[in-house]
Amino acid sequence: MKTEKLNLKYLLRAHTVIGLVCVFLFYISSYFGAFTLFLPYIQIWETPSKHIKHTVNYEFNIDKKLEKIINEYKFNTKNIEITPPNFKDPRIQISSKNQNSVFLNPNTNEILDTKNEQKTVSTFFNMIHFGGNIPIVGRVMMGIASICILFLIISGIMIFFLNKKKKANERKSFKRTWYKWHKYLGLFLAAFIFIFAITGAFLGFMLTNSAPFALTASNFEKSSLRPLVSPIIFKQKELLKEDTNISKMQDLSFLILKAKENYKNLHIDKINIYNFNKSNSQIHFRGHLTNNKALTGPFNKVFITLNSNTAEVIEKKQLEQTHIINKVMSAFYFLHFLPDETILLRTIFFILSIFMIICLVFGYLIWAEKKLKHQNDLGYFNFLNRFCIAIMIGVIPASCFVIFLHWLLPFETYDREIWIQGCFYILWAFTLFYSMYESSITKIFKLFFLISIILIVCAVLLHGLKTELYFWISFQKELYALFLVDIIFLFFALILLFLYFYIEKLEVFKRLHNEEFFYYEK
């Protein structure tokens, strides 16, 4: 019995210490990870050339336009790559190696102006999510945080079963409230967190620290794993031999129809035309299977190759013919990024991510409540609490500032991304200084919420002003991606407005207004 209690004691201590070490890193990763779940829609919202109506069925009726573009832009006919419209990007992209891409409106075949366009919000938020904003060690830190979260999940479940018996007459307290919600949310989200943590640990830690494996596998000739696995994972079709015989290829729309006839479940993501309008020309269709998205993602595309002149099948690769490494990598990528899933599953995962963030906050509050009774150095305790406010709450106005600046600063501004990222860090640093200076926790929360509300509402208005697509107009024009992002931002502002007015009345915040909990001394 004593051994069991001792084991539980050390397990609780390990759970607390490791949880406190990685809670801030994983909180930031989870916060920006929640944004990245809507990354495809945010990219459409922030890119004017993508403000195009989605149609139910694209006809790909660009055969005459295609030849004209290839000749006008002098594309290398050895390999012409076409990206069909999809829910991430409603445009048609035509490109060739080492040459600028041409984007078309699939509804009108009009060439779109993409000059100076930047995906500032989505790129920056995604970079922070995986630690790319911290040179050299960022990805490693996020990977270690994911590994720590795996330990916290396992140890948390063990603690639940080992410490299941509670005193029936135990007095209610704030610590019990934090513990109850942390426990129940953690158990409810265990499978969800485990999936994202293990895939995040693999993608963020294993792949960025693969030098020992690469050196061992290559007899110390190569320190990067990519050159070793690329021939397997990212195997490219070889270019065809030069041919001087001219032979006009079949219409693209006809070849697409033939490809779908010969490969029933193939959803075409990429089209490559080799030796365009030559007698040995081939057309290569890559994509994922509609009945198995998980195993046929970006790391494991299946394909069919046709003769461009006769539409005969030359080669067809099915899921059974792919390598096990490709399948595993594709499954990991799918579980973490949901690459080909649309709004429903992303919304469910977003809600679960919010619950995970709340679970992390409650975990910190348990530790803080415990330390309040045993902490001799209240100065250190106060600093950590206010640092926690700046990290967990101060990041909200800072991220809203990025969204606002994306539409405020002209696209042609020199070093625009650097200016926006710098403003993000300046405002985030300000939230830390203000949290240390202001004694009233209520005022801190209210100021952060108010700044966030103003910035996000102004961002939505600026988006409408600059694109002439306010959210009611985008709905009327069936530009649902724009409408969705605007509505989500406005709904987020409404939640913050609710918290701004009712923060003192909500039970969950009552303890936060206790002067003893957030000790302060000027």
Image (tube, grey):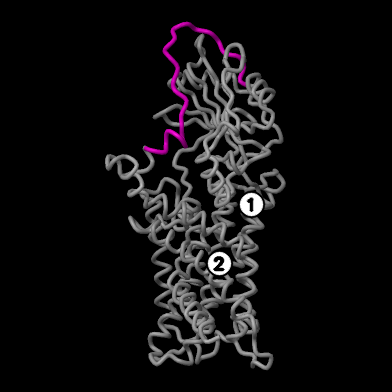
Query: Residue 307 versus residue 449: which sits nearer the camera?
Result: 307
Q: Rate crowding at label 1 as few (under 14), some (14 to 19) or many (20 or more) other CA atoms within 10 Å.
A: some
Which quadrant holds the C terminus?
bottom left
Q: Please say if 331 is above or below 197.
A: above
Q: Secondary structure at mark 2?
A: helix
Asked if the stretch drawn in magenta spans residue 242, the answer is yes
Q: Nearer the viewer, residue 488 or 457?
A: 488
- In the picture of the structure, the residue carrying the numbered disc 1 is 470
Q: Nearer the viewer, residue 336 or 13?
A: 13
Residue lying at 58% horizontally and 38% vertically, measured from the top left: 296
Query: Is residue 109 visible to us here?
Result: yes
Element type at marker 1? loop
Which mark, by number, is residue 454? 2
In the image, the segment drawn in magenta is: 228-252
Q: How many marks can you see?
A: 2
Is residue 233 inside the magenta stretch? yes
